[in-house]
Image (cartoon, rainbow, N blue to C red):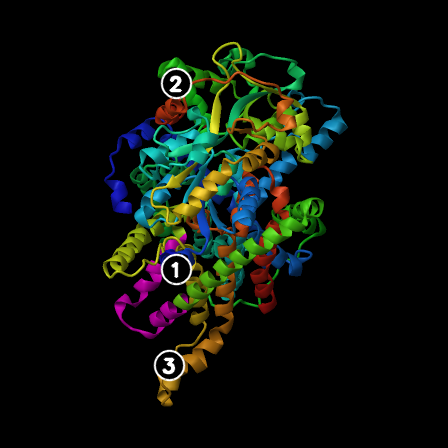
Amino acid sequence: MLTSGIFVSSELFSHLWQSVLPTYISNTLILAVLVVFIALLFGVPCAIIISQTNVVGRRYLRWLLMLPLAMPAYLVAYLYTDLFDYAGPVQRALRAYFQWQSPSDYWFFDIRTITGAAIMLALVLFPYVYMLVRTAFECQDQQLLRASRSLGYSFSKSFIKVALPLARPAIAIAASLVLMETLADFATVQYFAVNTLTTAIYDTWLEYGDLSTANALASILMLFVLFAVVAEQKARAGHRHQSNRPNNHIQLRQLSTGQHLLFAGYCWLLVLAGFVIPCLLLVQMAIDYATLTQLQQLLSSGLNSVKVSVFTATITTLIALLLVLFNRLHSHTWRKYPLQISGVGYAIPGTVLAMAMLATFGPLDHWLNDLAKALSFSGPGLLLSGSIFAIVFALVVRFAAIANGTIQSGVEQIPASLDIAPASLGVGLGRSLLKVHLPILKSSIFVAWLLVFVEAMKELPAVLLLRPFNFDTLSTQIYQLISDEQLERGALGALLIVLFGLLPIIYLNKRE
Amino acid sequence: MLNTSLLKKIVLTCLLLPSIVAQAAEVNVYSYRQPFLVKPLFDVFSKETGIKVNVVFAKKGMAERLKREGEYSPADVLLTTDISRLVELQANQLLQPVESAVIEQAVPAQFQATDNTWFALTTRVRNIYSAKRLGEVALNYEDLADPKYKGRVCTRSGKHPYNVALVASMIAEHGEEETLQWLKGLKANLARKPQGSDRGQVQAIHQNLCDLSLGNSYYFGKMLKDNKQKVWADAVNINFPNQNNRGAHVNISGVAMAKYAPNKDNALKLMEFLVSAKAQQMYAETNMEYPVRVGVPVSALVASWGTFKADELSLAEIAKHRKAAIKLIDQAKFDL
């Protein structure tokens, strides 16, 4: 697809280039930079506060700060627009209090802007930054810090000069994760009328009906993605000075009362804004609008969501397990490539992935049917591209990196001696994997499964483009309702997505 | 004699039986129309005929999908929400002509393709909604670009098919150059970037963000029947534009049979059902659209909006200017 994109020279492309494309590209860039910046601004301070200080409520905030991950960005965007719009409760209350009559009487920020979209995305993506950076701090070699302090650095100075630079790789990885998620976002930017490359691809393909130009746009988008991937790889290369296990002997900074209030307040603000408030709004809507017919619809689309997510999670986890173990147990120089290649999918937006699926399985289906015809059987129909197979395949490609990463980090905890020990006792490889490695990995495998399950549940654009007959998932149903300004009717379904999203967070928290 | 006729019947039954069994009674629909709009119609159809209706809803991309699926496409019946998409399907040779006396009789000639590849089911007006605070106004689409409404106009994306069709009708009336100027003037009048749905614009008028908006007729009825949205609709008047000249722009929702429809008979049955008096009445009552079938009355609510003069420009003419319209919208940077 990339190659076909580069060589396109259609008339439409030049028309787009002269009219709207530069804005699409600059919007994409501005949005990406803003989201990364704001997510770091939200996430890094939280990571520092939780890992380095004895802030009040630390035990709870530690996992509460992960909750916004369960919220799809498009939901948060819709809910906050409702809240902060001119007719929303916030502005209404302000008007009533200050006796303002019309919009010209006062200034209020406009949420449906590129900055608004960036804040919404950052609100649900910052937990990635928080989790990765916090873990980095907690796993840091404390001796380095102690050494710096014994050489005369103060607490804060040793943190800034030693701990922060050591966490740089984690910050970079988190930033690239946030960047990829932003580039892949479709529903939020569309709702806020921010035209980005992702929405442009969708439009060009389906509105102008021009696949080759859509491919060209996709290649431009993939250049951005490539940048994120390279940045991440570079950052990972610097991943050192870090033990694998969390360090329990971190010396926590004792805060004054004022600092307690300030730091805890900052964390709570993010928890409230990223999770509690949107959740309460949804509950309110569900109470006001829920009906029996909705419940029936919910059941069928909920089942579809679960079906797709279970398939995706199971297949992704199995493949990840195979690849990771293959990487571990083989000594060829090329052993790591399958793992790396399979991880690239995470950076591909769902829209582009859907196009790739159709381009691959469409012809394959035709070939199958032609073959069946030639053998005078009745054809199987669109077995691959016209069924949930294509959806699951796309999602497996998209979320492989999550499972790979989770299981890989689990494998790294297994001492190398355990690879050899069973063999020295005359136990075969298969048996040793089954009896030694898998039990140790059980928890990582489960976490990987859960994370993929939840992401698959939230995914929208790929499912939207690939779904077969009579097939709606929770996310497509909600998207449809949001486009008609009628989320109220989908509030129950939205809550269900959020509830599922909480599962891995609860489990991860329990495991700790 | 008796024997041969009986024999014939038996042979015929034997011949037909497998094909009936193989054709598990169903029909596959690709629909641009939303589930809640067409589902009640399909339910009645299934109940009457025993034919199961399978639906896939899409917002965009039906032609692309059909092209790709080619002769193995499972689609039988295609439902669209505007004329350009029907013509796009027709132009890409994704449709087959349907010869049916029932449909011929129900759908007036101006609302069907000359080659019988597509048929309109309902018509809808592209209205201009105006804030009640403006009082009674006689508006033309051209007025939306009048500087006196600077900062007071709202609309959904220019690229939405309903707006594209309107722009295409402007091209047919005024030519490309003048239409581009109109688009630029309209853009300069916008209170905010094009966004949201037709209902969202009425909400914006209710919020006093703007005074005028473009919107299809039936949304007005839909909003009046929605608890939350009724206050939005109560803040506006519905206007039929260009009543003193060419008339209001009218678009259609329509139906067609896919070229490679595997369940052709059932598809025909569904199409004939959709133009029947019963289905047309449901369109009128529950969707608040204008039924194409002559003699089926509009709903009381729609009737209360009054009669209007429709632009007599042919549907084919509108569809012809579709691509040019999209390009002009980009050129005016309408959505940016």
Residue corresponding to mark 2? B171
What chain letter is assigned to the residue under label 3? Answer: A
On the same chain, marks 1 and 3? The answer is no
Q: Which residues are magenta?
A: A320-346
Spatial CA distance of label 2 from label 3 is: 72 Å
**Which numbered marker is on residue A494?**
none
Q: Which residue is mark 1?
A: B10
Q: Is residue B165 above or below residue B29?
A: above
Residue at the outermost top position: B244
Helix, strand or loop for disc 1: helix
Residue B179 in sight in this render: yes
What residue is shown with label 3?
A430
Residue type, numbered disc 1: Ile
Between tags 2 and 3, which lies in front? 2
For the image shown, how many numbered marks are present on the structure?
A: 3
Give the chain of mark 2.
Answer: B
Residue A158 appearing in the image: no
Q: Residues within 10 Å of mark 1 (few under 14, many from 20)?
A: few
Q: Position of residue A261 (x, y in %)?
A: 70, 49
Q: Nearer the viewer, mark 1 or mark 3?
A: 1
Q: Nearer the viewer, mark 1 or mark 2?
A: 1
Q: Chain of mark 1?
A: B
Q: CA distance from mark 1 to mark 2?
A: 62 Å
Residue A341 counted in the magenta span:
yes
**x then y, percent, for residue A35:** 49, 42
Where residue B286 appears, x then y in whole percent?
Answer: 61, 35
Quarter of the view holding residue A482: top right
| Crowd around label 3: few <14 · some 14–19 · many ≥20 (10 Å) | few
Name the amino acid, label 3.
Answer: Gly
**Quarter-wise, where is residue B305 in the image?**
top right
